[in-house]
Image (tube, coloured by chain):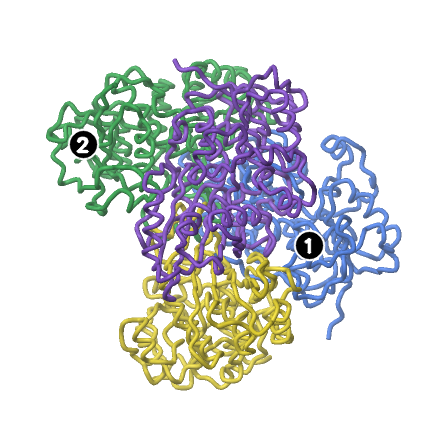
Chain colours: A green, B blue, C yellow, D purple
Amino acid sequence: MATKAKIGVLGASGYTGADLVRLLLRHPRAEIVLLTADRSAGKEMREVYPQFSPYELPRLVALDSVDWKAAALDLAFCALPHATTQKVIKDLLAKAPATKVVDLSADFRLHDTSAYAKWYGHEHHAAELQKEAVYGLVEVHRRDIKKARLVANPGCYTTCAQLPLVPLIENKAIDLDEIVIDAKSGMTGAGRAAKESMLFSEVSEGFHAYGVGHHRHMAELDQEFSLAAGRPVTVTFTPHLVPMNRGILSTIYVRGKRGRTPQDLHEVLLKYYAKEPFVHVLPFGETPQTRHIRGSNMTFIGVANDRIEGRAIIISALDNLVKGASGQAMQNMNLVLGYPETMGLEQVALFP
Amino acid sequence: MATKAKIGVLGASGYTGADLVRLLLRHPRAEIVLLTADRSAGKEMREVYPQFSPYELPRLVALDSVDWKAAALDLAFCALPHATTQKVIKDLLAKAPATKVVDLSADFRLHDTSAYAKWYGHEHHAAELQKEAVYGLVEVHRRDIKKARLVANPGCYTTCAQLPLVPLIENKAIDLDEIVIDAKSGMTGAGRAAKESMLFSEVSEGFHAYGVGHHRHMAELDQEFSLAAGRPVTVTFTPHLVPMNRGILSTIYVRGKRGRTPQDLHEVLLKYYAKEPFVHVLPFGETPQTRHIRGSNMTFIGVANDRIEGRAIIISALDNLVKGASGQAMQNMNLVLGYPETMGLEQVALFP
Amino acid sequence: MATKAKIGVLGASGYTGADLVRLLLRHPRAEIVLLTADRSAGKEMREVYPQFSPYELPRLVALDSVDWKAAALDLAFCALPHATTQKVIKDLLAKAPATKVVDLSADFRLHDTSAYAKWYGHEHHAAELQKEAVYGLVEVHRRDIKKARLVANPGCYTTCAQLPLVPLIENKAIDLDEIVIDAKSGMTGAGRAAKESMLFSEVSEGFHAYGVGHHRHMAELDQEFSLAAGRPVTVTFTPHLVPMNRGILSTIYVRGKRGRTPQDLHEVLLKYYAKEPFVHVLPFGETPQTRHIRGSNMTFIGVANDRIEGRAIIISALDNLVKGASGQAMQNMNLVLGYPETMGLEQVALFP
Amino acid sequence: MATKAKIGVLGASGYTGADLVRLLLRHPRAEIVLLTADRSAGKEMREVYPQFSPYELPRLVALDSVDWKAAALDLAFCALPHATTQKVIKDLLAKAPATKVVDLSADFRLHDTSAYAKWYGHEHHAAELQKEAVYGLVEVHRRDIKKARLVANPGCYTTCAQLPLVPLIENKAIDLDEIVIDAKSGMTGAGRAAKESMLFSEVSEGFHAYGVGHHRHMAELDQEFSLAAGRPVTVTFTPHLVPMNRGILSTIYVRGKRGRTPQDLHEVLLKYYAKEPFVHVLPFGETPQTRHIRGSNMTFIGVANDRIEGRAIIISALDNLVKGASGQAMQNMNLVLGYPETMGLEQVALFP
């Protein structure tokens, strides 16, 4: 029997933590040996997530109580709040340099220290690591990820926007100054914090935009789109909340460059993703629904004609907790540990 | 005591029919004397909508069985399917020329007979009436509506898009060639027909676009925007379905013309709607949620800066069954019958 | 024009507070002159409930800052948390003895000081008022309410259980030792407090019971059922949470006494509620749905045969925020102030 | 590599069909070689369920076009409507006697031909097979199932009620004449047929009972409870619909016999299910939520004290499409084909 990697999940009481545990329990080469959760330290995982009642899992411990060297983790998933993360990973890697880290926070996604300071309002606490970290959008940066010690797992909104747009930008297929991304997310993207605005009665039976004009995810989009384009790109991006749990759908309005038709854009995407296990480009004119990727690591992308000539409407959909967080994190883990990329990620979407 | 107008609701078993009955039951100058519903003819209204059990209402009858002359309606609301409508209203007005009609279908919204034929694939069956009909967007066409015999009540999507855009177009405040309308609707907009795609398990817990690139509502937008602009205007419009019952939210991307800032656009809207009872412009930077207008005849509009200079994000929200259908129809009824415009429409939104 | 009563809402930022404001804004004889909300003091009502943006309302103030004598309220609705309530009302009535009070908390529902101490774990802080208070289940205690200064508005679960059961118990029509009440409530019954267990993602797409075997509402049921029976009655009661906003449905299992059939029980209820405006007994064999009373002050009751002879299944449904809280409170207000009982409560249910 | 069994799914376009395909795609010893769906014959599975787009599956064919002998299936899952089923299976087993069948309809669940005729209103079309069929509640009838050719997969409501009650009845631990089962189901239990009563707007944001007093599932409960008791048992059972997709929760009211306390009942269940992989008994006093078993084959059972001495409240929860249908069917398949019972059924619940 193949040996199993020793895995820790830091921040196991959040939704991304829970989804990591769900996936890891069924990964044939992973063993969960550490679960941390500060406010719930001392509890069993089943007390914070009763769905794990039938399974044996380590008891939740406080982050401060962990001896990183003794823990000797092969890999740590870090699902902690922004800012805390920087200090924890710096400390962890100092004490256990052989441990690999896949970080699900936004802390290591921006390579540019000044961009970080601008968007987050303070200097980065681990500037060295900020430079070392590899941006973990697998389909774009696979090679670098395989060699990485620290992977910055992309955000959910940005994964959903980058997968359809990066190939088009790289191929100089679309006008860079007229990109509008109208994004809609399920509620788990907002996490498990007890806030009035996230109560059932505040969220169900209604729809609204938020962070209009100034959402932090834009920094990540700016970085990656500019990288793909070879020059600065600024897009319009509006996030909305849908009364559902899982899923992000992005409706993207673009104009083809130099006569590229929507069909041409579709061709670019088909070719780019021909061999990718987790990105599926629908036949031209078909557009995806979030429910058909729920619980799976899939991204579905559709391209259709706008009725205004030369313009296309591109729609992408993924599960924000899987391909948008924990699933992509496991995909990164597989690359970093040298496992087959799809291992433990074969779940078919749960619909209905 | 003031006399009450004799009102008929043709197509009372659909959702807009039910919402008309809900509003009419509380209108002090209206009396429901006729309810038609072909498939449910012979039933009591409480059998198709149990919420009406405590109220006395006429029994549902088949449309064919109605003697329009004898009925002597003061006003008929027509909430019938497309195409059927044309023939019914033609017949009704021929036999009872004194009856006023507010039609909630799309049949009389397009003035141009050739535009109608193009979008609907056949000649109009009542071309004369098509010309006579007044387009019932009250805030824009109030004067004409007061004198009308036949009012074409606007569509829900188009009302939600026109209320924020018509004033900006009329004031030449925005670029006409870059308007993107990303619209999201609750499920009641799709009606009560038993279709697989509208089942609870097909709709809940997910999100998707539909009719991408070719939705019929576009004809109505083209007509009204072009009228406001004095030249042809073609917008990009994508409808989506939200797992909720009532509400439409439109996220609209525009560019200010000749140096107009988003604040300038906000000013235009504030001024235009200063005295309107059913359109409320939020303070600059605030954007609306559908839940806060649920069940009421209100439209909320917000304007915010896009981060790209010169571009604004405008968001409008209304209840598709009220301001988007039955409420606006009653507003039209009030104008046509000479009642105070807000009569029977004072309900405060039901939230939570 | 008739004068308007000066009304205060203490605790206006909760859901019952908001629903009181919704109803009061449309009551022809009420004027909202005071709104309190401690944590939101200084804010406009529109900031905590944007649906009120179009309406003029007094700014929210802190409870401590109110001078009850100067306020000279005709009536105060008290929608404050348990325990706080006792002290506030004691103080209010000491300083403004002419003000009437309708209290929506549980504080004055139990007449027996020892029962109160047992269920709530401490002595009552206003024992005198506890005795004075009249239990505000209008259909049962209407006469006493008309003369009351302090009305204890019943709980939502208990209203839904009492309306079908009290007439049957009073008429000695059912076995008192085999009553099982399986109750299901929407989420607004849990209030607006920011708790993890009430987040959208914890509540949607699932169903569960809570407080199994020991819910506080039982004290209120014990008191009223025992009063109706003339001897102690203890029922089995299990509350559940439904992923919806408004509505309670109680499925009640009873056995007819001395040969009473389910039809006999139906007859008792039909007769008892023949003239009641807000309790509607459905034809025998039909059972209600919560959606058909949403937003209205109606209670629907249905009676059906169990397949076990002699046993009946009774189902009652109401909107927990209206007949279960704010609507019944306004009904009490109308009685106390001598207004027609249905004034301001005529809204038809909002379905769909 | 182990050989794979050749599997057919008859009725693949329904929700149980889709869930079978979801599970079979990940079963290491199963290969889907046949999918039938009459109305969708000729379509690809991805056209009726887009979540299967990335997978290779046989095209849907009409039932009539299948040559059972040539198909040489190792096992057929039959997810067809009631009555059709009898004829299809009779024909299939006549032509391909070596094929095993797991039937998900109600057609073979009743052993008694007269009970069948009484509840379904006509004679059974395959009386011989009705006698041969083994009732597939694995935890109770495992031995017989292993030897069966035709397994009648239990209903979802009845599985949820039997798992907690059969051990208590077998152990003579509860009073047999006072059992009340108040059951609540998600919408997928009603299937994918396009009915008005199942539209999103008819089902969301509300709650109701249906089939009060006369639901067909009772026949199945009567049979199995009477078998366990050794004498006729009739229970009270009321089904309700919850606005959610997956999940059944049963709240069961029982009285302990001969001094058995709720803790005693809990002990009986703990012992009975100690080694079962798919039934998990929670610690005494804890009760389950449907969301924590969503998408998995688990059943969670909790036992708590009623406040009336001697009475207990038992709550069980399962996913109606998995343990209540397709998962249990695969569990039966594993037994019939000699595979490990849990193979392909290891998915952890998807929450949130």
The picture quadrant where one finds residue A18 is top left
The picture quadrant where one finds residue B193 is top right
Label 2 belongs to which residue? A89
Q: Which amino acid does label 1 sit on?
A: Val
| D224 sits left or right of C217 in the view | right
Q: Nearer the viewer, residue A48 or B99?
A: A48
| C18 sits left or right of B75 in the view | left
Label 1 belongs to which residue? B48
Mark 2 vs mark 1: give the one in front: 1
Q: Which type of secondary structure does the marked residue at label 2 adopt?
A: helix
Instruction: Give the CA distance from mark 2 to mark 1.
Output: 62 Å
Visible residue check, residue B269: no
Q: Which type of secondary structure does the marked residue at label 1 adopt?
A: helix
Task: Return the x and y of residue D139 as percentages of the image width and height.
Answer: 42, 39
Q: Which amino acid does label 2 sit on?
A: Ile
The quarter of the rendered structure image containing the N terminus of chain C is bottom right
Chain hosting mark 2: A
Task: Return the x and y of residue B123 as percentages of the image width and height.
Answer: 81, 33
Q: Nearer the viewer, residue D158 or B278?
A: D158
Badge 2: few (under 14), some or many (20 or more) residues near its Cα, within 10 Å?
Answer: some
Chain hosting mark 1: B
Visible residue check, residue B336: yes
| A60 sits left or right of D212 in the view | left
